[in-house]
Amino acid sequence: MLIIDIEASGTDSRVHGILSIGAVDFLNPERQFYGECRLWEGARIMEEALEVNGFTYEEVTDIEKQSEEELLYKFRSWFNEARDHTLAGQNAHFDLSFLIAGCRRNGIDISFAHRIVDLHSIAFYHMVTGGIEPPTHNRRSDIDSNMIMNYVGIPEEPRPHHALNGAIWEAEAIHRLFFNSPLFDVFKDRSIPWVG
């Protein structure tokens, strides 16, 4: 599995662009990827997105930064070296949609699978099988990233969001939910609430 986190200029992969890609190879967690790029020409920017990821307008339009195409070629090289190409993450469909749109826009061939591993679903299942009623709001699941990190016993991801931090925190949460043990040394002193 490859734990992926994308920071973008908005929420719609058709009109917004990739700003950074962070990834962790779950089978070899020291093998990580991080890169930033400038927005593609004509991409839209949502101010709310920049507030979440901490990028400035000047940073995302900096012509000195590599292009989306250059970043995606580097990511493809990293991706192709992995033994397992299954993508996973907190909002993996969001991340996958930006990867697919960016690759199409730049004529880059990467064979992404349509099936993903979703951290929300794993946490939901873990709660239900543990006899915990998942929280809801407006009759829908209210399990967000911060709630999951608290549930697995690690601090919330630092703000503003950073793609590599997101991938690391998500990989740690998935490992704890799957194996009842920490993945990264930085979290090893954080106890897992359901482990005696």
Image: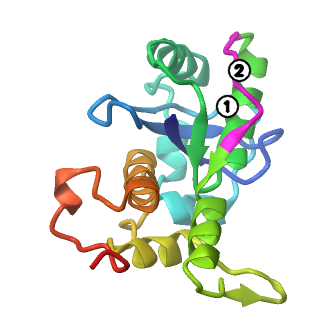
Q: Is residue 156 magenta?
A: no
Q: Which of 87 and 161 is in front in this view?
A: 87
Element type at marker 2?
Answer: helix
User: Residue 172 or 53: which is nearer the viewer?
Assistant: 172
Would you name the residue on which mark 2 appears? Answer: 103
Quarter where residue 6 is shown: top right
> Looking at the image, which is closer to me, 113 or 52?
113
Q: Which amino acid does label 2 sit on?
A: Cys
Residue at 59% across / 85% down in the picture?
A: 131
Q: Give the range drawn in magenta.
A: 108-116
Tell me the number on the disc at residue 8: none
Is residue 116 shown above or below 135? above
User: Compared to 126, does 53 lie above or below?
Assistant: above
Q: Which residue is drawn at 70% across and 16% down?
A: 111
- Label 1's element? helix
Closest to the observer, 116 or 45: 116
User: Quadrant location of residue 137?
Assistant: bottom right
- Amino acid at circle 1: Leu
